[in-house]
Image (cartoon, rainbow, N blue to C red):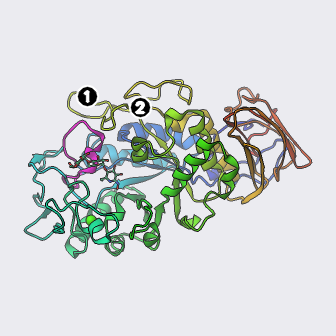
Amino acid sequence: MSAACTTGVPAPAATSAPTGPAAVAAPAGARDVGVQLFQWTWDAIAAECTDHLGPAGYGWVLTSPPQEHVLGSQWWTAYQPVSYRLESRLGTRAQLSAMVAACHAAGVEVLADAVVNHMTGKDARGTGWAGSPYSHYDYPGIWSDAAGDFHHCGVGPADDISSYKDAFQVQSCELVNLADLATGTGRVQDGIAAYLTDLLSLGVDGFRIDAAKHLPAEDLAAIVARLPAGTRIVSEVIRGTGEPVTPEQYTAIGDVLEFGWGKDVTGMVRGGSLRLAAGLGTGSTYLPSDKAWIFVENHDTERSRSTLGYRDGADYVLANVLMLATDYGRPIVYSGYAFTDRDAGPVQDAAGKVLDAQCAAPVGPDVTYTDGEWVCQHRWTAIEGMVGWRDAVGDDPVGDRWEDGDAFALSRGTRGLVVLNGGDVEVAAQVPTTLSDGSYCDVVAGPAVDGRCAGDPVAVRDGVADVRVAPHTAVALHVGAPAGA
Ligand code: LM2
Ligand code: CA
């Protein structure tokens, strides 16, 4: 009974059967939840894997780009590669390697953000973070115009993309002046594959392919074909109405980020109409579930304010709860730092090195964060509790669904139930569930302390849960968190 009401589910090998009133077979322990630790240093990620991500049940972490980049305090310098040396203001090659080892020891995989469509976007020459000299179309020892390594699409005066309705422009012109690599050539494909292979040699498990929409799918396929089978690939292809380049064109290469999910859940939660959540991910406008990686927000949508974000407090938590409860796709929790200025980078020392992230206690939807402070969404009680919930339900399918006004509930087989209230008044309801009879802790309210639930225990009797859900909150029960020791 000692495992009662903990939010974290141990790694699959260490999983033991719950002994509470709802005892069933051991949780499946899917550990398919990821977290994007935006602009976290390698040292900080290593510590977080050991101290929090592993114990909480996160299965993988997405890092910011690890290669040498242009100088500047803004966050987006990381998206302007100068060379493929693994030296950046987030840490050295040795620190990166040590981070991968620490995360693996904690049962957490590492995906790196791979910027491979382009190099820098500045017209003036310069020197990168690790000291490499460069100019816009010349990266000594790597790429040059003389060798034919760059596209010059010939559209407009600056070769910039001007129409997303034209696939040629999207893939062969420049994205905001970023020197566009001629990814159709064997030489460029070899060079990019060598960079990715170097990361794999440090133990990295796979890649987010940045700006994948801007690489022809066949070029990306040719690069990935040079990597070992089983390398995880997730392409960033932003869905755009009426655009010729679509996420579906990249599913043969690997998985793809489904931007539609975060956009749609944002509309639903803002509108309070959570009952529509039952349909999220089921429409024909979505990627197939086994290819889709879903997220409430990422570093771009956080800045464009096109999705819910940390400032949305309770509504943001509700969207995350829905993401972690659904059986559609693979969820990515986002974790960044507070900002007012869209360009503002993370807090740095005088030399420009990013300071190790720290999560000040408490963190959560009710905290007011000052600029530069780490928001640590992945440690918010409700979100961390739902990561444990998801690991406990494993691949149990969605069973009963229930809705009433602004409230919505779903069960995952006999292992979990979540009830969400998007409205402004408390919901007190008898919710049908396939969860076994028993008394459970609400893991959204927090982990149990000394065997006592953080929130009110919830009884399930004869297939019905007797719940009270405060406005704009959720209640989540699972077999790994029975009430009462
Ligand atoms: C991405 N996905 O496709 C990233 O998620 C996104 O964050 C990147 O843009 C983009 N693609 C390129 O990798 C960011 C940022 C831009 C920034 C670029 C390049 O959102 O604002 O552009 O990185 O650092 C900045 C300036 C822009 C300038 C450009 C080149 O904002 O005005 O364009 O640098 O100097 C002249
Ligand atoms: Ca391109």
Ligand 1 closer than 8 Å to label 2 CB: no
Judging by the rendered image, the residue that carries numbered circle 1 is 349
Give the residue type at disc 1: Asp
Residue drawn at the location 28% of the way across and 60% of the way down: 116
Mark 1 to mark 2: distance in Å? Answer: 17 Å
User: x and y percent of residue 364 in the render?
Assistant: 55, 30
Q: Nearer the viewer, residue 212 or 140?
A: 212
Q: Nearer the viewer, residue 470 or 219?
A: 470
Residue drawn at the location 30% of the way across and 65% of the way down: 170
Q: Secondary structure at mark 2?
A: loop
Judging by the rendered image, the residue that carries numbered circle 2 is 338
Residue 7 lies in the magenta-colored region: no
Residue drawn at the location 68% of the way across and 40% of the way down: 422
The secondary structure that most of the magenta stretch takes on is loop
User: x and y percent of residue 92 in the render?
Assistant: 27, 43
User: x and y percent of residue 79 in the render?
Assistant: 28, 50
**The image quadrant in which ligand 2 is located:** bottom left
Compared to 107, does 355 lie above or below? above
Compared to 331, does 461 lie above or below? above
Badge 2 local density, few (<14 within 10 Å), some, or many (20+)? many
Residue drawn at the location 82% of the way across and 53% of the way down: 434
Residue 79 lies in the magenta-colored region: yes
Badge 1 local density, few (<14 within 10 Å), some, or many (20+)? few
Is residue 310 visible from the viewing direction of this image?
A: yes
Where is the C terminus found, in terms of image quarters? top right
Give the residue type at disc 2: Ala
User: x and y percent of residue 277 in the render?
Assistant: 66, 52
Question: Residue placed farthest to the right in the image?
Answer: 462
Q: Which residues are magenta?
A: 69-85
Is residue 193 visible from the viewing direction of this image?
A: no
